[in-house]
Image: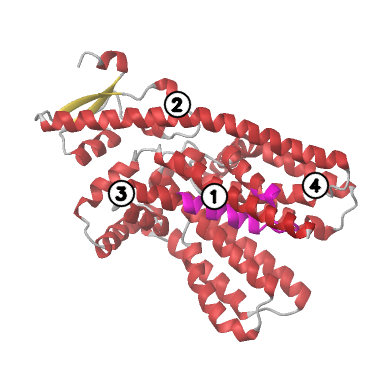
Amino acid sequence: MKNKFIKINQKFIFLFLVALSFLFILVYNVFTPQMMDDIRYIDLEAGAHSIVDLIKLEYEQYMGWTGRSVGHFILRCFLMCDKMVFNIFNSIAFVALTLFMYYNIEGRKKWDVFVYLLVNLLMWIFGVSFSQTVLWETGACNYLWGSTIIMGYISLFKYCINKDCSKKADIAISVGLFILGIFSGWCNENTSGGCILLLCIWIAFYVQKHKKMRIWMITGVVGNLIGFLIMILAPGNINRKLSVEEGEEHTGLMRLVSRILKCNNAIYESFFVLIAICIVAFILVRLQKAVWEKSKNMLIFFFVFVATCYALVLAPEPMRRAYFGAGIFLIISCIQGIVDIIDNDIYIRAVKLSAVSIMSLYFLFTYIECGADLARIYRDSNERVAYIQEQSALGNKDITVPVLHPDFENKYSAAYLGDLSTEDREYWINKGYAGYYGVGSILAVPRDEWQGY
């Protein structure tokens, strides 16, 4: 009776934590205004009135700029709706991603509150460019949604391997994994590539153990490859790559060396703490004389993380947010390492619980402080919009607005990375705002100068 009560209590706490995860991210989504590419895409979509119109616009982008069509099409659909619709569904996507990551941790307990809490903490604290990849609408559709689709597909594939789905279900599973594999492969260049690598590793271990291969394994990987090739062979990708490569300082071998160095710096700056935790966890597991199987999942995800990072060497100038998917693989590896440590010793249990408690406390203080700043940025943004609309109604077409308060800048807001220019009314962000609000031009000035307008 006592054990049953503990299990029910554990399940309740776990579900409460999931609900809390949704609420926390929803608040931040609500206080993140549309900005940068959001405004530009809304302006470009002004003449779109149906799904067919959106497909035509996405085809133009596929031919001229990027092959990452799945994320961009999701974005176009959300931009046709009220921002609150995106806020809700984006929060659901974030929670889904954390649950998919949780599912891929082996050796966890049922309704493991410790593991799920750790997934959330590491995502919030170490998630790469969180403001751009999770909260900014355009970035979220490309990175959060892409990673959620990929991790969902990985989780489904893992489920099929764990259940060793028999021939009775081969046809349905084969078709389903093929179709879903196309979308998963079409999400993000390096993360989708990491997904293909991970599936191939799992299949290799399965074949080694069972001396056979299921049909759905082949169709799943083939679907992944098809989606991946559709994405990377897009004419827009080729055009963009050529234009960016022209601006690179080096050529030939030095260009490759330069890209590797940039990748090393990005890994050091974004992942050093997580890599250090992985190293400590692995050493402790080895010292406990655990067998190879104990660390296999950790090492596989770590290897995929490394490959996903260095795949960006093929890109001319990858933005830091491009490492978001690699970070997800590393977080899974990191948590797997922590779970693998045998905690029969009271001191090891104390270290684990103390570390999570301290991280939780740090996160709560940071969340409250940055949340207050996000609310102030949201207020600034709304005041600017109201002023633009007021001046437009008065017939003023060349409008000057204040910059955002510099004191409110924080790691969870991308608003300062793409604020209006204070020098050029023809800057692409300024032009996007002007087109969206139907005015001639918009320029930003420091707040102390704006008081006179």
Occupied quadrant, residue 273:
top right
- Give the answer, above or below, for where 254 lies relative to 375: below
Horizontally, residue 377 falls left or right of residue 55, namely right
Q: Residues within 10 Å of mark 3 (few under 14, many from 20)?
A: few
Occupied quadrant, residue 136:
top left
> For numbered disc 2, what is the local secondary structure?
loop
Residue on which disc 1 sits: 19
Of the two numbered discs 4 and 3 on the same chain, state the one appearing first in sequence: 3
Q: Position of residue 438 (x, y in %)?
A: 16, 39
Horizontally, residue 148 falls left or right of residue 138, namely right
- Assign the magenta stretch its main secondary structure: helix
Horizontally, residue 418 falls left or right of residue 111, namely left
- Residue type highlighted by circle 2: Glu
Q: Quadrant of the C terminus?
A: top left
- Residue type highlighted by circle 1: Ala
In this view, the mark in front (3 or 2): 3
Of the two numbered discs 1 and 2 on the same chain, state the one appearing first in sequence: 1
Q: Residues within 10 Å of mark 1 (few under 14, many from 20)?
A: few
In space, the residues marked 4 and 1 are separated at their CA atoms by: 32 Å
- Residue type highlighted by circle 4: Phe
Residue on which disc 4 sits: 282
